Amino acid sequence: MLMRLYDDFNSLIPFKPSDLNRHLSNLVDSFHEGMNRYLSGFPRLNMEDNEDHIVVRVALPGVKADEIHVEVVSDFLTVKANRERAEDPESANRLYSERRFERYEEKFKLPCKVNGAMTKAAYTDGVLAITLAKDEIEKPVSVKVGKED
């Protein structure tokens, strides 16, 4: 009796409470990610989806190539970087500075699963370019439809 009453009540609601919770959680996560990017000041990110691969470009000015760590797991990309403050003789006279010298770490959700073993990364002129090969399972497959015999 109680289960039937519960089912009847749920049929009156146009959405499931679990769906609402999931949508609100996604909204809060997106807002939080955007605010972190805005407040951190760097890096800027571009992500391109090509037929066979995904290219991610991250602006990491002033970072040495050996201070960057890239990790790929399934459909997540983690980029870590350290930018140390160089001792500047003029820093004693500096009144204001907008340049940030800090540790950077961010995890990106990729639009599909990628093959981590085929990932390539290059760092040139302050821009980290990461090329991620799409996993074979995730690529679309065309199926020709024929007539039944």
Image: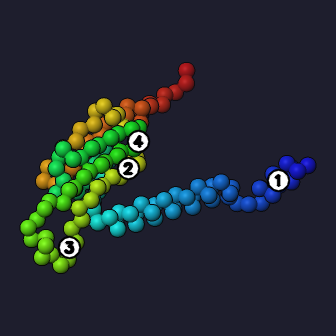
Task: Residue 140: name its quadrant.
Answer: top left
Whole-number angstrom distance, CA of label 1 to CA of label 3:
61 Å
Looking at the image, residue 25 sits to the left or right of residue 47; the answer is: right
In the rendered view, tell whether residue 90 sits above or below residue 119.
Answer: below
At 14% from the left and 60% from the top, the residue drawn is 86
Whole-number angstrom distance, CA of label 4 to CA of label 2:
10 Å
Q: Which mark is residue 75?
A: 4
* Mark 1 neighbour density, 10 Å: few (under 14) some (14–19) many (20 or more): few
* Mark 3 neighbour density, 10 Å: few (under 14) some (14–19) many (20 or more): few
Q: Which residue is mark 2?
A: 107
Q: Which residue is mark 1?
A: 6
Residue 140 seen in render: no
Q: Are marks 4 and 2 in contact (CB under 8 Å)?
A: no
Q: Which mark is residue 97?
A: 3
* Labels 2, 3: front one: 3
Asked whether 88 or 53 is in front, the reply is 88
Asked whether 84 or 23 is in front, the reply is 84
Q: Earlier in the sequence, mark 4 or mark 1?
A: 1
* Mark 4 neighbour density, 10 Å: few (under 14) some (14–19) many (20 or more): some
The residue type indicated by label 4 comes to Asp
